[in-house]
Image: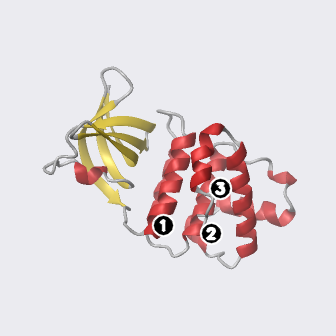
Amino acid sequence: MEFRTAGFVLKKQSFGEADRILRIFSREFGLLSALAKGVKKTKSRKAGCLELFCETNFRLHRKTGELFLVTETAPLSSFSSSNLQFLKPAFEAAELLLALAPPEKPLPKIYKNFHDFLEILSATSKPRLLKIAFFTKVLSIFGFLPDFEQFEKRDKKFFKFLLRESFPQILKLEEEEEIFKKTEDYLREILENVTEKTSRVVSATRDWS
């Protein structure tokens, strides 16, 4: 099996002296595990494309087993940053996807949301609001938000706004501090009760600031 797909590296771990195992969130095939050989070597041509949160065009190959082999890479876009204002919410968003996304299942809406989230996160001064919006959209797509009819009228209207509008439109509501705070408390409650798989997400998102 061999194919090309765009994707983001969400997690990487060392494997042997020169290789890495990557968790890739791909546009066409969802969450994948892949082996990148030789990328820890200083002369590796692939290394620059395999940093966390870089969008890359991958060529992947698999004969047997669960791991794909990264055979080619080409850069598409990079949202990587050493700024903690970017890195903290980016890691938390990645943990959410790693905890909830089933392996090798296409999730095109979530992929687009993640792409847009990283793109705006790299430029915004409002990461908290952006993170609340991203988590709301993703948890809704996975089916973890209940029927909005049980909400108060204002809360129901706000949740529908978060799901309907783009991230730039949502960020214009920064003055709505009270309802954003209420929303983040509600999302935290969902994460604490969904499944044991989200325990690492909960621990990473106790401080939404």
- Specify the quadrant that holds the C terminus: bottom right
Q: Nearer the viewer, residue 2 or 14?
A: 14
Inter-mark Cα distance, 3 to 2:
12 Å
- Tell me which numbered mark, 1 or 2, is placed earlier along the sequence: 1
- Can you identify the residue that label 1 sits on? 121
> Amino acid type of disc 1?
Leu
Q: Position of residue 98 (x, y in %)?
A: 51, 43
> Which of the two marks, 3 or 2, is nearer to us in this view?
3
Q: Are marks 3 and 1 in contact (CB under 8 Å)?
A: no
Residue located 61% across and 43% down the image? 198
User: Can see residue 35?
Assistant: yes
- Tell me which numbered mark, 3 or 2, is placed earlier along the sequence: 3
- Can you identify the residue that label 2 sits on? 170
64, above or below 186, in the image: above
Q: Position of residue 103 (x, y in %)?
A: 49, 33
Inter-mark Cα distance, 1 to 2:
13 Å
- Can you identify the residue that label 3 sits on? 136
Judged from the image, the secondary structure of the residue bearing numbered disc 3 is helix
Q: Position of residue 64 (x, y in %)?
A: 33, 20
Quadrant housing residue 36: top left
Taking 16 as reference, is 206 left or right?
right
Q: Position of residue 111 (x, y in %)?
A: 49, 49
Quadrant housing residue 188: bottom right
9, above or below 84, in the image: above
